[in-house]
Amino acid sequence: MVHNNNTQPKSPLRIQRESIGLTQPELARQVGVSDRNIRDWENGASLPRLDRAAALARSLRVPLKQICKWMQIDVSGIPDDISPPKPE
């Protein structure tokens, strides 16, 4: 983790948000939540609902599994995305 001026480590979520040039309010608008939600997710104070996590992954341009890992959710044993079966 990278440290900010307050010597508190920056979360991977924040690092990714900043790397693509989004502010917390901009990301909040894209995801459909308040700025406070984004702060809480970045600080580890709360976890997003699944639909919000999917929107977050989309906005941050990362796989949903990565969002889960950044939020300390164990995703071991969960397969990666697969293509739907082809009709016969």
Image: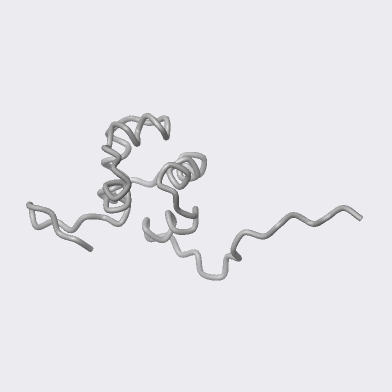
Q: In this view, does 64 lie above or below 52?
A: below
Label count reads: 0
Which quadrant, please, contains the C terminus? bottom right
In the picture, measured across the screen, residue 58 lies left or right of residue 29, that is: right
Hey, which quadrant is residue 1 in on the image? bottom left
Q: How is the image coloured?
A: one colour
Q: Residue 18 location in percent, x, y?
A: 26, 47
- Farthest residue in the bottom direction? 77
Name the residue at 79% across, 57% down: 85
Q: Is residue 76 above or below residue 4?
A: below
In the picture, measured across the screen, residue 59 lies left or right of residue 86, that is: left
In the picture, measured across the screen, residue 9 lies left or right of residue 87, that is: left
Q: Residue 64 location in percent, x, y?
A: 49, 53
Q: Which of 37 and 10 is in front in this view?
A: 10
Name the residue at 32% across, 37% down: 37
Q: Residue 54 location in percent, x, y?
A: 50, 44
Q: Which of 22 and 37 is in front in this view?
A: 22
Name the residue at 13% across, 54% down: 4
Q: Residue 39 location in percent, x, y?
A: 26, 41
Q: Is residue 3 above or below residue 61?
A: below
Q: Which of 72 and 70 is in front in this view?
A: 70
